[in-house]
């Protein structure tokens, strides 16, 4: 769905949909009833993103 005055899909929404899909796949293949917060961070790449930002700050 295009927003008023803009052509094409919302890029932020597309990223959110992709991340949601990753979580759904992880949840459907998990042995436990719920994903742990650590597993959610792993699926979403939160820890890797934090590590990359930390490395960029220390290098810059």
Image (tube, grey):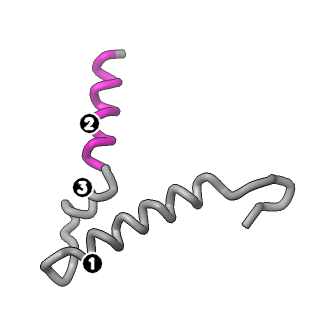
Residue identified by numbered label 1 = 28
Q: Is residue 48 above or below residue 11?
A: above
Residue 1 shows which numbered tag? none
Outermost residue, top side: 60
Is label 3 or label 1 in front? 1
Residue 42 shows which numbered tag? 3
Residue 60 position, x and y percent, is 36, 15
Residue name at image x 58 percent, y 54 percent:
12
Left/right placement of residue 1 relative to residue 32 reads right
Left/right placement of residue 11 relative to residue 51 reads right
Q: Which one is in front, 26 or 13?
A: 26
Left/right placement of residue 30 relative to residue 18 reads left
Residue 52 position, x and y percent, is 31, 33
Marks 2 and 1, how far apart at CA = 27 Å
The tally of labels here is 3
The crowd level at tag 2 (other Cα within 10 Å; few <14, some 14-19, many 20+) is few
Q: Which one is in front, 51 or 33?
A: 33
Left/right placement of residue 36 relative to residue 13 reads left
Residue name at image x 22 percent, y 72 percent:
35
């Amino acid at each position: 769905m295009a927003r008023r005055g803009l052509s094409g899909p919302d890029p932020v929404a597309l990223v959110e949909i992709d991340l949601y899909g990753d979580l759904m796949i992880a949840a459907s293949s998990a042995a436990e009833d719920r994903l742990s917060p650590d597993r959610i961070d792993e699926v979403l790449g939160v820890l890797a993103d934090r590590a990359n930002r930390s490395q960029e700050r220390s290098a810059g």
